[in-house]
Image (tube, grey):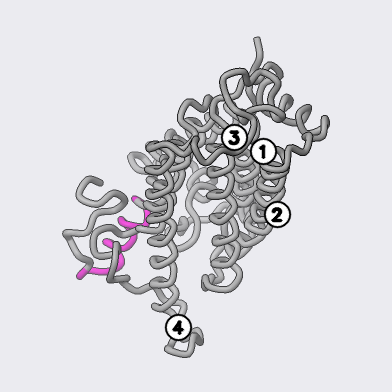
């Protein structure tokens, strides 16, 4: 029986975050300090500390490191796709062997070359946007994160790019009878258009949300004047506490729509959904506990729903 490494790793991360979230949200006081401290980070980190876990923490601003990797890795993936589907350049054999190893040896394509190219382009611009935001826009405090969160960032972006290539048509897979192996404008259908629209809207709104957060800590000249947390307002912040996390989920949902029929991307989407949802809930509860005048009509993650 063939086992997909990518499916296993994303399923493991998704179910781990779901189980830990339930435990933290319901019986946090009864859990070992080491588990709570490992799970929580940043402004909602655990007040109680475990001396061993302390040695496994790194600065939160190390987040920017795996966006360097993500930008480079997505660029390589996009270049390979363009060379294969536009310029008809053969894919090196070691790459197909690599995809066999992380996905399935008897891989079958699940979408055409046009969907592959558009999805990879979306991941490319998102990775570079996050690179720009973390290096030149975001303002990090002196908070810590567990090294497991740091490692997961690399695993996530490695898996996302590899997953798109793993189910792309020939020359990335040999079993791709039903799908064209070159980019065609005529293959842009209504599903792909819907995915592109959702992605671009969420892409823009996430950037605006991040700019909004930065403006709370800077003056008009862009100089940092405080590291304190304030209540963000305007745009999607008037409806939910974490529009940047909501938009992240929407972008991965948009790619899911573009790659409809994928065997791997549903696992990635479920992981992103569960992770972003829990982070949003923790942020929302923290805002409510920190600010007595926090808007009661504001939802945590999804407008008018959650």
Q: What element carries label 3?
A: helix
Specify whether 121 is left or right of 194: right
Specify whether 71 is left or right of 89: left
Observer-side mark, 2 or 1, equals: 1
Q: Is mark 1 on a helix, strand or loop?
A: helix
Question: Residue visible at 42% across and 59% down?
Answer: 44
Q: Which of 177 and 76 is in front in this view?
A: 177
Where does label 4 land, which residue?
218
Residue 115 percent location from the top left of the image: 53, 37
Question: Residue visible at 61% across and 45% down?
Answer: 157
Name the magenta segment's main secondary structure. helix
Where does label 1 land, which residue?
85
Is residue 197 depicted above or below 259 in this figure?
A: below
Where does label 2 land, which residue?
72
Specify whether 210 is left or right of 242: right
Is residue 169 depicted above or below 141 in this figure?
A: above
Observer-side mark, 3 or 4, equals: 3
The reply to whether callout 1 and callout 3 are in contact (CB within 8 Å) is yes
- Whether residue 129 appears in magenta in the rendering, the answer is no
The reply to whether callout 4 and callout 1 are in contact (CB within 8 Å) is no
Where does label 3 land, which residue?
113
Toward the front, the furthest residue is 186
The reply to whether callout 3 and callout 4 are in contact (CB within 8 Å) is no
Specify whether 164 is left or right of 230: right
Q: Quadrant of the N terminus?
A: top right
Whichever of labels 1 and 3 marks the residue nearer the N terminus, that label is 1
Q: Magenta part of the protein: which range?
A: 281-293
Observer-side mark, 2 or 3, equals: 3
Alpha carbon distance from label 3 to label 4: 44 Å
Q: Quadrant of residue 289?
A: bottom left
């Amino acid at each position: 029986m063939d086992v997909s490494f990518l499916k296993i790793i994303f399923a493991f991360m998704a179910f781990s975050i779901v189980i830990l979230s339930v435990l933290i949200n319901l019986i946090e006081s009864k859990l070992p300090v080491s588990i709570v401290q490992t799970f929580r980070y940043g402004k909602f980190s655990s007040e109680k500390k475990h001396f061993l876990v302390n040695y496994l923490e790194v600065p939160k601003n190390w987040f920017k490191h795996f966006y360097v990797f993500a930008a480079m890795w997505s660029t390589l993936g996009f270049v390979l796709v363009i060379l294969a589907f536009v310029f008809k350049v053969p894919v090196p054999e070691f790459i197909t062997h690599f995809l066999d190893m992380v996905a399935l040896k008897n891989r079958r394509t699940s979408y055409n070359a046009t969907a592959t190219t558009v999805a990879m382009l979306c991941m490319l611009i998102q990775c570079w946007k996050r690179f720009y935001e973390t290096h030149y826009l975001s303002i990090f405090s002196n908070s810590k994160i567990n090294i497991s969160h740091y490692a997961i960032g690399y695993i996530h972006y490695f898996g996302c790019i590899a997953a798109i290539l793993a189910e792309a048509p020939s020359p990335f897979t040999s079993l791709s009878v039903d799908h064209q192996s070159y980019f065609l404008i005529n293959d842009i259908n209504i599903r792909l258009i819907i995915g592109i629209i959702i992605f671009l809207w969420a892409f823009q709104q996430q950037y605006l949300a991040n700019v909004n957060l930065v403006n709370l800590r800077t003056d008009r000249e862009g100089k940092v004047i405080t590291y304190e947390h304030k209540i963000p307002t305007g745009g999607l912040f008037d409806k939910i506490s974490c529009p940047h996390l909501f938009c992240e989920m929407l972008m991965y949902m948009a790619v899911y729509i573009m790659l409809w029929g994928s065997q791997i991307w549903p696992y990635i989407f479920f992981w992103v959904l569960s992770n972003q949802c829990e982070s949003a809930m923790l942020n929302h509860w923290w805002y409510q506990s920190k600010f007595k005048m926090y808007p009661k009509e504001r939802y945590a993650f999804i407008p008018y729903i959650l």
